[in-house]
Image (cartoon, rainbow, N blue to C red):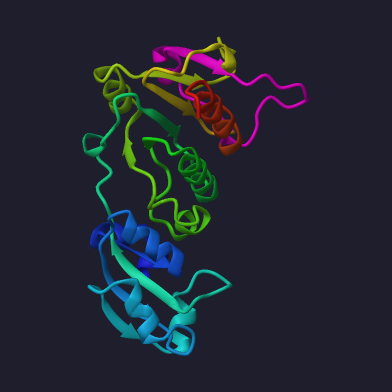
Amino acid sequence: MLLQEKAKARKQSGTFLIEGKREISLALKGGYEIETILFLPEVCSETETRKLSNNAELIEINKDVYQKLAYRDTTEGVLAVAKAKSTQLSDLQLSENPLILIAEAPEKPGNIGALLRTADAANLDAVIIANPKSDLYNPNVVRSSVGCLFTNQIATGTTTEIIAFLKERNINFYCATLQNSTSYHTQDYTTPTALVVGTEATGLTQEWRDAATQNIIIPMQGEIDSMNVSVAAAILIFEAKRQRGF
């Protein structure tokens, strides 16, 4: 199925595929519109399937078709075709004192999924992807986020657009980088804050480093000078949450 394999097909149709009962339920809870549910009756009955969504069209499929569509090894016999949401910065609804995660150009769907899981665990206001390299609705992102793609507010934009967005709203932003940095725990994250992380290979671009409220670093005592981006993000996020009394 093209929705599963091709980002172009997902973009043109404005739809994508969700696999699994929990993921479908989280998508509905997150306000996603489910158009169609495909089910394998010997694994998930029509009665069970109907409980997932009263409004979606149900289509019974056979095992051969299901195996071509399913992405995971373990299966629950149900998939859904859902409408993608807008990822415009202007659509974000932020609290008075937001805490936001920004990731610049993450390439690996698994890292995006892990970042979304961390953001959900911390109940962040939003996750913003700068200069995205991967399709947000790539099945690997859906799978690795274990449904947290649907529980977070997500926006995308260029680095320039996002910096302007933050400055217009007086949101301080702290960039994790090796250059000209101070230890992350010395900063105050109790006011409107965005935490910005880059790729493990190249880090953040100069535009972020020049514009930052403060560049920050996580001190490390081993031989390497970087860690997995989702781990680094989690350390920064939960320091901010600690400061905010959560």
- Quick check: 115 left or right of 126? right
Q: Which residue is at 50% across, 42% downward?
A: 121
Residue 60: give x, y in percent of width and height: 35, 87
Residue 135, above or below 44: above
Q: Does residue 3 show up magenta in the picture?
A: no
State the image quarter where residue 185 is shown: top right
State the image quarter where residue 94 is shown: top left
Residue 244, above or below 91: above
Q: Which residue is at 50% across, 76% downward?
A: 76
Q: Which residues are magenta?
A: 201-229
| Circle count | 0
Residue 175, above or below 49: above
Q: Which residue is at 26% across, 52% downward?
A: 85
Nearest to the observer: residue 97 or residue 132: 97
- Quick check: 67 left or right of 83? right
Q: Residue furthest front?
A: 245
Q: Which residue is at 38% across, 64% downward?
A: 25
Residue 29: give x, y in percent of width and height: 33, 57
Q: Quadrant of the N terminus?
A: bottom left
Residue 126: give x, y in percent of width and height: 37, 37
Q: Does residue 226 show up magenta in the picture?
A: yes
State the image quarter where residue 81 is shown: bottom left
Residue 151: give x, y in percent of width and height: 39, 49
